[in-house]
Amino acid sequence: MSARVRGSSSGWAAWLVGASVAVSATLVASNAAACEPRTAALEGYGELPLPTDRLGCNLVDAATGENLLFYGAAVLSTMELSASGADHEIRVFVEERLGTRGFSDFTVSLGYYGLPAMGALVYATGLVARDTKLTGAGAAALQAMTVTFATTVLLKGLTGRPFPNHGGHPESPDRLLHPEWAREWRGPLLENSAWPSGHTSVAVALASSLVSYYADVPWLPWVLYPGAASIAFGMMSGAHHWASDVVAGALMGHAIGASIGADFRRMHDARVGRPRVALVPFGTAGLALAGAF
């Protein structure tokens, strides 16, 4: 067992770096030509915000620039927590001192169903109320969660990190006696694996997209980020993820969510500030141009 673990862990850092580069290259190549500069006018977009608006441009933005710092931090923190044994030590502490299986199971369900429902509810409420700003917030949240989910699924398949219980029963008496499990990476498996935490990344993407969109609402981060943190904690307390899975997921989710949220807010501001010109009756037999600027 130990020889196999050492062999599989010897190239784990290379897999992490390679996976990150692969995801970044995929996103950049997806639609780079269609990405307008941030200062460009947003002509061609209708009054109704859609979750697919500027998808190509937002993929590029999310994969480049200062966001690379977040992805680098995700990789480096994972390398340190995994190789040093801190992942295992944190797992033991959380499960022995803080573990609450019921709460963890709740956060799992919340991640699968609650988070997408929240984004859809915001979007639908905006449509019903004919509130384009609220609709834009919902569209940003839906796009951010979708892009983040796709990114984490790709990384999970590329890295192949086993889950903390290593396929065993979550209450097995020897589950906390294997520190080597935290250092095991199997490479591309094309199946679901632990790194990064999808629940955490999507939860943070939802929070960051809305916080970035509503940058003028100072209390919003104090509501949304604790909610995302509770999901992250649930992933560890129920042994669904290592601490480094959660940290990496949070960093990636924030980078993607904040980029997309800011762009959708810029789209909203451009829509609101767009000059409107219309023909209106003038006098008894004429027409005139009337505009709002």
Image (spheres, rainbow, N blue to C red):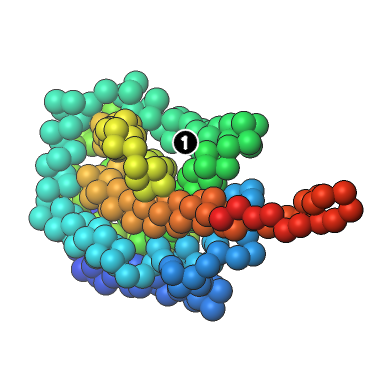
Q: State the image coordinates of residue 64 (x, y, percent, origin top left).
A: 36, 70
Percent x, y for residue 226? 28, 32
| SS at circle 1 | helix
| Residue at the spot 52% in from the left edge and 54% down from the top edge | 273
Residue 4 visible in the displayed image: no
Q: Which residue is mark 1?
A: 115
Q: Nearer the viewer, residue 92 or 290?
A: 290
Query: Does 23 sit above or below residue 288?
Result: below
With 93 as the anchor, is 39 left or right in this view? Answer: right
Q: Which residue, as the protein is rendered here, is positioned at the far front?
A: 283
| Up-down relation of residue 108 to residue 13 (above or below) | above
- How many numbered discs sit on the rendered protein? 1
| Residue that sits furthest to the bottom in the current view | 33
Residue sitting at 15 percent across and 36 percent down?
Answer: 92
Using a 10 Å C-alpha cutoff, classify the residue at mark 1 as few (fewer than 14 neighbours), some (14 to 19) or many (20 or more). Answer: many
Q: Nearer the viewer, residue 176 or 85?
A: 85
Residue 279 in view of the camera:
yes
Check the picture and name the quadrant holding the N terminus: bottom left
Please give the name of the residue rendered at 34% of the width and 56% of the height, measured from the top-left corner: 255
In percent of the image, x 39 and y 43: which residue is there? 214
- Residue 158 spot, x, y in % from top left: 40, 64
Report the amino acid beneath label 1.
Leu
Viewer-proximal residue among 2 and 218: 218
- Please give left or right for residue 124 compared with residue 7 in the image: right
Indicate the position of residue 114 as horizontal and vertical percent values.
48, 31
